[in-house]
Amino acid sequence: MGKVTGFKEFERKDESYTSVQERVGHYKEFTVPLSEAEITKQGSRCMDCGIPFCHSGCPLGNLIPDFNHMVHQGEWQKASWILHSTNNFPEFTGRLCPAPCEKACVLGIINDPISIENIEKNIVERAFAEGWIKPQPPKTRTGKTVAIVGSGPAGLAAAQQLNRAGHTVTVFERDNAIGGLLRYGIPNFKMEKGIIDRRVAILEAEGITFKVNTNVGVNYDINDLKAFDSIVLCGGATERRGLPTPGADADGVVQAMDFLTQQTKVVFGEKIENQVLATGKDVIVIGGGDTGSDCVGTSNRHGAKSVTNFEIMPKPPVERSASTPWPYWPLQLKTSSSHKEGAERNWLINTKEFIKDANGKLIALKTVNVEWKMVPGQRPELIEIAGSEKTWPCDLALLALGFTGPEKTLSSQLGIELDFRSNYKAEYGKYQTNIPNIFTAGDMRRGQSLIVWAISEGREAARQVDLYLMGSTNLPTKEGGDLPAL
């Protein structure tokens, strides 16, 4: 695949960024694309490795060496077809996926892995620019109706696959625009929302119906939902984790998703009463994951006085550690573009108290340094270090602590069983709940996870729904189905 000696001749190159000073002044994407010639070189680095572990690293089973080879040969349209044969939305994953495929790349054993994610992004953007991505409505309809609850990546993938099978698909979204957390949980500077709108226009032209501001079980009768031949629940894991810490009710302690959602809505002209702003404030972001990073970037764009990031876990190693050998996903330090815009990062630190003034406003955080006691066969134990207490000035604390699972409105009204982690329970590999015509996919089924996993689950669940409705299916599966015809 690629050029036989390409991985020896060419070094990995990634997109660069505009300067910090420039990019913190706006909410647009700020990557500087590589030239077509350079992307071709990057595709040429793909080795003839024999067993492409990137396949197993990718939850979608993307045919990565195949589309790399097409890029190497300048066959961009074929590359687009190969990419879309397994991934409905490479424009999302090409921007937002942490690229487990790259961590499983065989070349990564001895050198920098192939820049798979960036190649993927360039393929799909070229495809849109050239007009290769066109609506493909089904030639016939089955007469079966399917309701999909939730318009995140799992719901959208399931919708497109089921529509391709000829079913009449309606997608319900409780917010005022399609996309789920892609829309309001991901800042515009990581993915501009026109990227979602562009794809939704394709889906609508293919015959999918979208209903926004429709909260099933709240302002849409659950009995109307039951009238569909099948239902796919893709509502995500949206129960936010809080902190049972004294003073957590202070004015100024805010959930990260509220902060991020408000800002995205403001970017698109919505007026938010009492918008949470970081302007001129000492901001502390609690949580070191991607959402915490997004809060850092947004706070800097607001013009925060200072931005500090807390993480209760130890600082990960810079290089891959022996505990996560190739091709496993490594526990490794990640420094995002937002971190590079300005933030003091702290590990092994625990918040003990949110300190508020007489009016209930947050003015400071009290913390203690910690360490983890690890005993084989036992749960890790958190140990506070005596004498390490510290008080930090803070006007705004953003809780980026992840999610505990899906909301239970639908499960209670529909009678859906839950698993031991409080996710919607579905039979393994079939995505089918205890109610035969109701299926579930994405974070609602597996818990908080990656966009690439959500798309994979949506595709696989759609195949099972089609099989349930029709008795057979031609929809592809990463487990060994046929690709659609070119």
Image (spheres, rainbow, N blue to C red):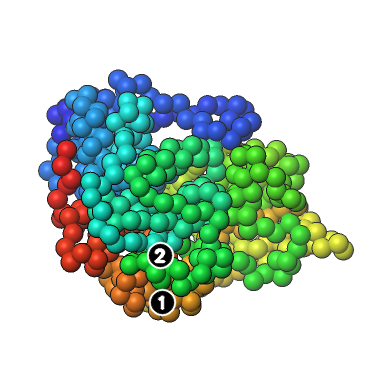
Nearer to us in this view, 61 or 125: 125
- Indicate left or right for 253 with 128 as reference: right
Please identify the residue farthest to the right as the structure is shown: 358
Q: Position of residue 259 (x, y in %)?
A: 64, 51
- Front one among 399 and 413: 413
- Residue at (27, 70) in percent of width and height: 428
Q: Does 465 sit above or below residue 166?
A: below
The residue at the point 80 percent across, 59 percent down is 361
Whether residue 397 is visible to the viewer of this picture, yes or no, is: yes
Q: Is residue 176 left or right of residue 430?
A: right
Which corner quadrant of the image does residue 250 belong to? bottom right
The answer to whether mark 1 and mark 2 are in CB contact below 8 A is yes
- Disc marking residue 451: none
**Which element type, helix, strand or loop, lies under badge 1?**
loop
Which type of secondary structure does the marked residue at label 2 adopt?
strand
**To which residue does mark 1 refer?**
416
For marks 1 and 2 on the same chain, the one whose residue lies earlier in the sequence: 2
**What whole-number distance in Å separates the C-alpha atoms at marks 1 and 2?**
10 Å
Q: Judge from the rendering whether residue 280 lies leftward or rightward of residue 14; answer left or right.
A: right
Between 396 and 162, the one nearer to me in the picture: 162
The residue indicated by pointer 2 is 233
Q: Does residue 61 appear anywhere in the picture?
A: no
Amino acid type shown at disc 1: Ile
Residue type at mark 2: give it. Answer: Leu
User: At x 57% / y 65%, what residue is drawn?
Assistant: 219
| Place of residue 177 in the rendered image (x, y in percent of width and height, measured from the top left) | 53, 48
x, y percent for residue 312? 56, 61
Q: Is residue 371 above or below residue 295?
A: below
